[in-house]
Image: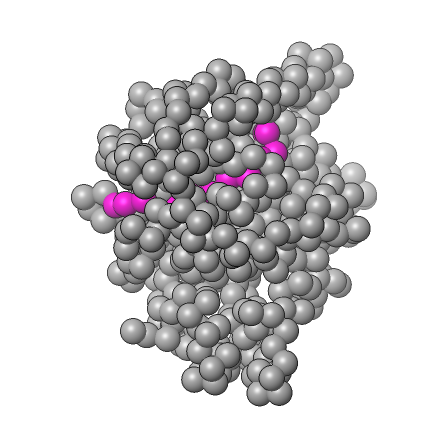
Amino acid sequence: MALTDLSMLELAAKLAAGALSSVEATRACLARAAQVDGKVKAFLRLDEKGALAAAEASDARRKAGNPASPLDGVPIGLKDIFLTEGVETTCASRILQGFIPPYDATVVSLLKQAGLPIMGKLNMDEFAMGSSTESSAYGPTHNPWALDRTPGGSSGGSAAAVAAREVFGALGTDTGGSIRQPAALTNLVGLKPTYGRVSRYGVIAFASSLDQVGPMARTVADTAALLQLIARHDPLDSTSAPVEAPDYREDLEGGVRGLKLGVPREYFIDGMDPEVEATVREALRDYERMGATLVEVSLPHTKYALATYYLLAPAEASSNLARYDGVRYGLRAKDAKGLREMYGQTRERGFGAEVKRRIMLGTYALSAGYYDAYYLRAQKVRTLIRQDFSRAFEQVDAILSPTSPVPAFKLGEKADDLLAMYLMDVFTLPCNLAGIPGLSLPCGFTKSNLPIGLQILGKPFDEARMLRIARAFEREHDFTRRLAPV
Ligand code: GLN
């Protein structure tokens, strides 16, 4: 087994035992990236020097018997949406080209304090708007399971880097599915925590009422261990919840006997891939065999979720992205005559087509005369969607569904079909609208060896139980041990 094939916790055990050093692990990741990233294109920026310096410091701490955390010394990657002090951060947009943040996002500080070497910044859809990484201004990322296919998005670089074993784990963000969908398409575990569970301070904002940071890793236990490092209250984020995090690994092996798992009628729809449906239904039967009770539930407002999301998310984005004016960050159109022209030309040149489309949609939805008809109405429907979940959770402990209606699709296949691309999130975005946690778990493969993900939705702040439910399935199968062929 190659060093880079180890899980985060397996590597951590070897580091703790002195069988391996963090410098060796970091060098192995760098070598792996040199070998495969020309094909995968997960990295926008490698920080070889920073990673090796952090690894040396980690080895010194381990030697002194003083590790900073259980994952001290385990190299990871970051979606390029997290501010990293002194390391260029572009959110995969031209408009942030050359932007060097003066401080770290809270989650970045937490990972540094915990001793994890940060290998670099990973590709994504521009400003996290997309489901395939194809809207990145720097070209798409390729799926390590099939290089002519997308790894999903928007955290596609994070997913691909972990699946290709260029890093041991990564952080992504999820506004409508951007952690869970790429995790599903690359055979990873991806968790979008409860809104407010993880700090958004220093995370470039897309839709602030929906955005949430979360871990992506190859096993359930790794996901739990990574979440443990970042799940805490942050006074710098006013929406961060003052809720103590439990020990996410304590009850991982607790099984599902006696749990009630909801199966939403509305999440098995016409037009979904038959292999995805069959594999997810098989996983549901496995849960029954393991002692859980399946309960059919209804989330009647599901059919409005996509429309609601595509009003609210662009509305918030149009406001958040107003700050990119050529004055404060990155790109500036220098040849423009006067301030207004400079604003206009900077934004014209700096933003890609999808981002412009969202800004226009959002500006329209918020404009006087349309605000009540669109934005306000969408907010009301959002409440109905949230109530659907509250009602369902009176009956069940968690909800199971497919993560994505289809496995990884070919790069370019949906690039010109906006609606087809937006449909990639039908099963993931109601969770963001409701603010509840969602997890994607590898649950099988198509005949052509493409990964399929099972989604587990939980009650607010019930991540520990969701991880336990995921672990019960993982224990019965070898799916999370299967490695991408790249
Ligand atoms: N694909 C969705 C969108 O384009 C969700 C993206 C995300 O979760 N960041 O908005």
As drawn, which residue projects farthest toward the front? 258
Residue 296: horizontal and vertical position, in percent?
39, 22
**Quarter the N terminus occupies:** bottom left
Residue 476: horizontal and vertical position, in percent?
29, 50
On the image, which quarter does residue 293 sit in? top left
Tell me which residue sits at (43%, 44%) in the image: 469
Query: Is there any visible trace of residue 38 in the rendered image?
Result: no
- Asked whether residue 149 is drawn in magenta, I would say no
Left or right of 28: which side holds 273? left
Left or right of 46: which side holds 206? right
On the image, which quarter does residue 38 sit in? bottom left
Tell me which residue sits at (42%, 60%) in the image: 162
Query: Is there any visible trace of residue 36 in the rendered image?
Result: yes
Q: Is residue 453 above or below residue 420?
A: below
**Magenta-drawn segment:** 433-445
Q: Is residue 278 above or below residue 200?
A: above
* 485 or 476: nearer the viewer: 476
Q: Is residue 39 above or below residue 387?
A: below
Q: Is residue 333 above or below residue 402?
A: below
Tell me which residue sits at (61%, 60%) in the image: 229
Left or right of 301: which side holds 451? left
Counting the numbered discs, the total is 0
Residue 388: horizontal and vertical position, in percent?
54, 20
- Asked whether residue 444 is drawn in magenta, I would say yes
* 440 or 127: nearer the viewer: 440
* 227 or 309: nearer the viewer: 227
**Quarter the C terminus occupies:** bottom left
* 60 or 150: nearer the viewer: 60
**Magenta portion: prevailing SS class:** strand
Left or right of 344: which side holds 73? left
Q: How is the image coloured?
A: one colour
Tell me which residue sits at (60%, 18%) in the image: 384
